[in-house]
Image: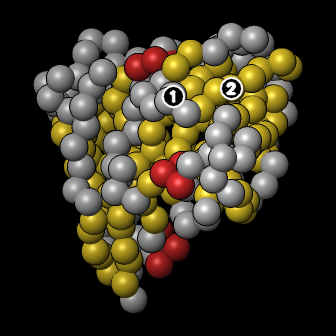
């Protein structure tokens, strides 16, 4: 199982770009990188997933360097509603026994 | 939209009671999961199931059991509740095939307090 390390917490202000980095030094060839977002009193929800280089969707971008030992979730122009816990997962996406959530990063967006 | 529902949002039980947490998904997903979430520890996998009547242990199965008699329903059972099982319990489901197979869909969670 790939072990992930991410910051416990981060603060930002409205309108700023936020980058949350996840380290995963022992990532395997079949592993994908997935990010989830969790608001208080709700279950996590999928944000974005990638294997290498850059992936972008309507809410975030995911940057993965060539060695894949880390990844960065980028949230453009955050608002107060982006205050949440963000989880990085690394593992074989089709193997139930291979995906584990880490402790997550608590992002607080201030006015 | 995929919907995963859990039987209770809040539950208070006494030590030694048998506790049932129910989870139902409406998307015909093959895979279902039970997690517990505690401050500073993130989500930890208790059990998962990849088919009816099939189950696999996750990282922390001790003190728990599961049941999957129908594809849409996955139950978590605390045989004899203890105070260290006070936690948020989250259920999730995932398809096995297709472009969305990598995404887990979560229910809203059940906050269980054991006194």
Q: Chain of mark 1?
A: B
Q: Count neighbours of disc 1 (C-alpha within 10 A) and say few if under 14, some if 14 to 19, many if 20 or more.
A: some
The quarter of the rendered structure image containing the C terminus of chain A is bottom left
Under tag 1, what secondary structure? loop
Task: Tell me the residue that label 1 is attached to.
Answer: B61
Q: Is residue B96 above or below residue B61?
A: above
Image side of residue A110 versus residue B24, left or right: left
Tell me the number on the disc at residue B98.
none
Whichever of callouts 1 and 2 sits on the residue coming sooner in the sequence is 1
Rendered image: mark on residue B66: 2
Q: Quadrant of residue B43?
A: top left
Q: Residue B60, percent across and down? A: 45, 32
Residue drawn 75% across the image and 11% down it: B53
Choose top left, top right, bottom left or bottom right for residue A40: bottom right
B46 relative to A111, above or below:
above
Q: Secondary structure at mark 2?
A: strand
Q: Residue at x 81, y 29 (%)?
A: B73
Closest to the observer: A50 or B59?
B59
Q: Residue B70, image x and y in percent? A: 85, 20
From mark 1 to mark 2, how far is it between C-alphas?
Answer: 9 Å
Q: Position of residue B94 (x, y in %)?
A: 64, 27
Q: Which chain's residue wears label 2?
A: B
Residue placed most toward the observer, B31 or B17:
B17
């Amino acid at each position: 199982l790939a072990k992930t390390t991410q910051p416990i917490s981060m603060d930002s202000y409205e309108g700023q770009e936020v980058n949350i980095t996840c380290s995963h030094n022992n990532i395997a060839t079949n592993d994908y990188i997935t990010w989830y977002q969790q608001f208080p009193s709700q279950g996590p929800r999928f944000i974005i997933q990638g294997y290498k280089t850059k992936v972008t969707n309507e809410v975030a971008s995911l940057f993965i360097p060539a060695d894949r030992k880390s990844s960065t979730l980028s949230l453009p122009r955050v608002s107060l509603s982006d205050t949440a816990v963000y989880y990085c997962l690394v593992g074989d996406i089709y193997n139930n026994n291979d995906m584990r959530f880490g402790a997550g990063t608590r992002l607080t967006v201030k006015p | 939209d995929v919907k995963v529902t859990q039987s209770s949002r809040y539950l208070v039980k006494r030590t030694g009671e048998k506790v049932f947490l129910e989870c139902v998904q409406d998307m015909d997903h093959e895979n279902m999961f039970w997690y517990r979430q505690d401050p500073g520890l993130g989500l930890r996998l208790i059990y998962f199931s990849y088919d009816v009547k099939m189950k696999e242990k996750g990282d922390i199965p001790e003190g728990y059991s599961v049941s999957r008699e129908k594809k849409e329903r996955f139950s978590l059972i605390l045989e004899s509740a203890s105070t260290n099982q006070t936690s948020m319990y989250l259920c999730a489901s995932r398809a096995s095939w297709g472009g969305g197979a990598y995404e887990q869909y979560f229910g809203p969670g059940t906050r269980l307090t054991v006194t």
